[in-house]
Amino acid sequence: MRRILPALACLILVLATAPEAFADRIVLKNGKAYEGTIVEQTDALVKIRTAKATLSFQMDQVASVEKGEWALGELEKRLSALDPSKPGAYLDAARYMAGPGREGFDLPTFLRLCEIASSLDQGLAFDAQTLLAKELGAAGEKRAASRAMRRALVARPGDAGTLRALEPLNKEVVRLAELQMKNLVTALDEVLCDSLDLAAPKLQPMDPALMPEDVLRELKVPFEKFTADIRSRVRCKTCAGQRILKCPGCVTPGENVCKACAGQGRTPAAVAKNDPEAKFGETVCLACHGVGLELCKECKATRQITIEFKPIGKKPKSPVVVNAEAGREAEAINKVVDPKTWRSREDGGYVSGIVAGSVKGGGEITCPACQGAIYSPPMTPIDSDSVQATRDAASKYVEGLKTWDPLGFEPAAYDQDVVRDGCFRRQKGKWVK
C-alpha cells in the first residue's frame, strides 16, 4: 500500500493539472495542427489559446476548425448539475463560462450564476460580484459594472483593489449621466419647438435610471411612455413609417454563402479529391456543417435542419430534425451529434448528411433609425407645461445648481431583484424552482 499511494497521488495531480480533455483544434493547410481553446473567430481570422501562447491565423491559412465537445457539453453538464445546497458550484460555473467555456458565454445566464452564488453564500459575494463587474464592463455595461463593484464592497468593505477599479468606472458613469442630461435639455427644447423628428432620436437611447427623480416626476408619466409618445408622432424618414427594411447582410433572404467552402458544403480538399466513398465527417465543411449556406446573423434568421444517418446494421435510423438560430447552428447540431466523430449521441449512428430547410424570419430587419416605432399620432396634444417643467428641472443640474448621484447605492452584496423568483435550478436550458 505504501508503494501504491505515491503513484496514485501523482496520477491525481496529473489529472488535476491536465488540459481540457476535449480541446478545440485548428488544422492549417500546411498540415500543422494546434490544440487549445478558441478565444475568437471571425470570417477573417481565428485565435486559439494553447498551453504555451495565444496564436492568430488568417482564415485563408486554415484547412479546418474543430470545436471540442466541452464547449457545449461540459458547460451544459455543469449548469444542469447546479444545486442550491452547493453555492460554490454556481461561482465555479460562472468562472468556467467566462474561461474555458467561453464559446457558450451568455451574459444573462452568467449574471444569474453570480447573483445566485452571492445570495446563497455571502462569503462568495466578493469574488462573484468582482467577476460579474469585469464581464459587464467588457460588455459596455458601465453602470451595471459599477453597481456590481459596489456590491463587492458591501461584501468586503474598504477593499483597496476594488476601490481603485471603481473610481474610473464611477467617473465614466457620471460623465455619461451628465452628457445625457445635456441631451435631455436639448431634446425637450426641440419638443417645445415642435421639432419632434429631431427630439425622438435623442430621447430614444436615454436611460431614465441615470436621471434625478425630481426631473422624472415633472413629466407626470413614465419616461419610457413619454418617449414612445414622441416617437409615435414622427414618421421615420429612413423606412417611411414601414418599420421594416430589407436586411443589408443577406445575399439571399436570411442566408449567406459559406465563405469557408464557397457554398460547396465540403472542404476544398474534399471537393478536389471528389471521393464518393469518403465519410461525411472527413469531408464536411465545419463552418456550415455541409449546408453550404449560413444563416444571416443581422436579421436573426432561423430554420430547421435535418440530420440524416446511415443504417445501423440492417436497421435504418430515422433522421433527426432540430431548430437552428443564426450563429447557433453548431449548438443545435452538437446536441444531437458528437462533432469529433459525427456520430449520434443517442446510439452512435454515423451521420450521412445534413439538409437545411427553408429560412424563417430572414431577409428583413427592424429599422435601426426608429427601432420599429409605429407612426400613430395620438389625438391628444403634448403636455407642454410638464415638458417645460421637466426641461427647467433638468437645466438646474446641467448648470451645476443642483447635483445628484447617478450611480445609486447598493445596500446588499447581491442584486435581490435577480434572485427574487427563486429559480436556482437549470433544466432543459431554463431556470426553474
Image: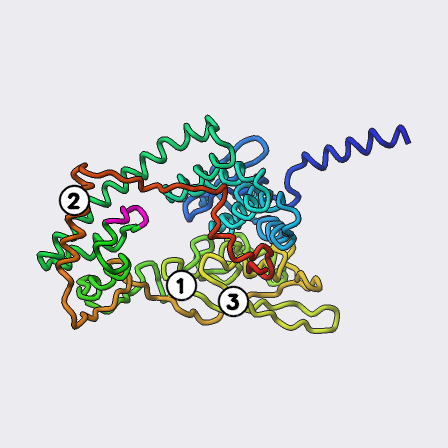
Image quadrant where one finds the N terminus: top right
The stretch of residues the image draws in magenta is 209-214
- Marks 3 and 1 sit apart, C-alpha to C-alpha, by 15 Å
- Callout 2: 10 Å neighbours few (<14), some, many (20+)? some
For disc 2, the marked residue is 395
- Report the magenta stretch's main SS: helix
Residue at 15%, 64% (x, y): give it: 382
Camera-nearest residue between 408 and 141 = 408
Q: Amino acid at mark 3?
A: Asn
Tell me which numbered mark, 3 or 1, is placed earlier along the sequence: 1
Q: Which mark is residue 138?
A: none
- Callout 3: 10 Å neighbours few (<14), some, many (20+)? some
Helix, strand or loop at mark 2 = helix
Residue 70 visible: yes
For disc 3, the marked residue is 323
Against 394, residue 229 (above or below) is below
Tell me which numbered mark, 2 or 3, is placed earlier along the sequence: 3
**Cβ–Cβ under 8 Å for marks 2 and 1:** no
Against 97, residue 400 (above or below) is above
Does the stretch in magenta take in 210?
yes
How far from the left and from the top, in percent, is residue 223? 26, 57
- Report whether 111 appears left or right of 84: left
For disc 1, the marked residue is 255
Q: Amino acid at mark 1?
A: Glu
